[in-house]
Image (cartoon, grey):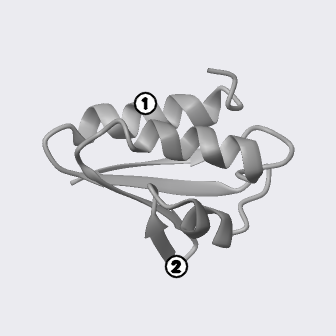
């Protein structure tokens, strides 16, 4: 299992379009991937799950992956969040 903490850079956070980009990227990997905010963990491949966290700009989240490509999945999603979803 691999995980990293990252602070959401863009103003609106993980809502609508940025969440869609995030989920599309997560679905490129075979690993199970989760997003954790405070004590709540959701499936990173689920739009409703990610939106339900209410992640706003400046929030620190944890991206967790478990599987064959877990390191690449976490690194890729962290880079996407750090870029402000400008990938």
Nearer the camera: disc 1 or disc 2:
1
Label whose residue precedes the other's in the sequence (1 or 2): 2
Name the side, left or right, on which 70 lies relative to 46.
left
Is residue 8 visible to the viewer in this orientation of the structure? no
Q: Quadrant of residue 28?
A: top left
Residue 38, by quadrant, is: bottom right
In this rendering, position of residue 73 left or right of residue 18 = left
Label ID, residue 10: none
Marks 1 and 2, how far apart in space?
A: 23 Å
Residue 41 image position (x, y, % from top left): 47, 72
Q: Left or right: where does residue 3 sit relative to residue 39?
A: left
Q: Which mark is residue 76?
A: 1
Density class for disc 2 (Cα within 10 Å; few <14, some 14-19, many ≥20) is few
In percent of width and height, residue 80 lies at: 57, 31
Question: Badge 1: how crowded within 10 Å, few (<14), some, or many (20+)?
Answer: some
Q: Quadrant of the N terminus?
A: bottom left
**Would you place residue 17 above or below residue 75 in this image?**
below
Relative placement, left or right, of 46 versus 58 is left
The mark tally for this picture is: 2
Residue found at the far right of this picture: 11
**Residue drawn at (29%, 31%) of the image:** 72
Q: In the rendered structure, are the residues bearing label 1 and label 2 in contact, judged by CB atoms less than 8 Å apart? A: no
Q: Residue furthest top?
A: 87
**Mark 2 residue element:** loop
Residue under numbered circle 2: 39
**Image vertical order of residue 25 relative to residue 15, above or below:** above
Q: Secondary structure under badge 1?
A: helix
Q: Quadrant of the C terminus?
A: top right
Q: Is residue 54 shown to the viewer in this render?
A: yes
Residue at 49% x, 61% y: name it.
46
């Amino acid at each position: 299992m691999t995980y990293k903490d990252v602070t959401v850079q863009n103003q609106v956070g993980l809502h609508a379009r940025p969440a869609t980009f995030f989920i599309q990227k997560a679905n490129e990997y075979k690993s199970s991937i989760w997003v954790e905010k405070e004590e709540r963990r959701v499936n990173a491949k689920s739009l409703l799950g990610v939106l339900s966290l209410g992640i706003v700009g400046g929030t620190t989240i944890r991206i967790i992956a478990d599987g064959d490509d877990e390191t690449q999945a976490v690194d890729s999603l962290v880079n996407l969040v750090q870029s402000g979803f400008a990938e």
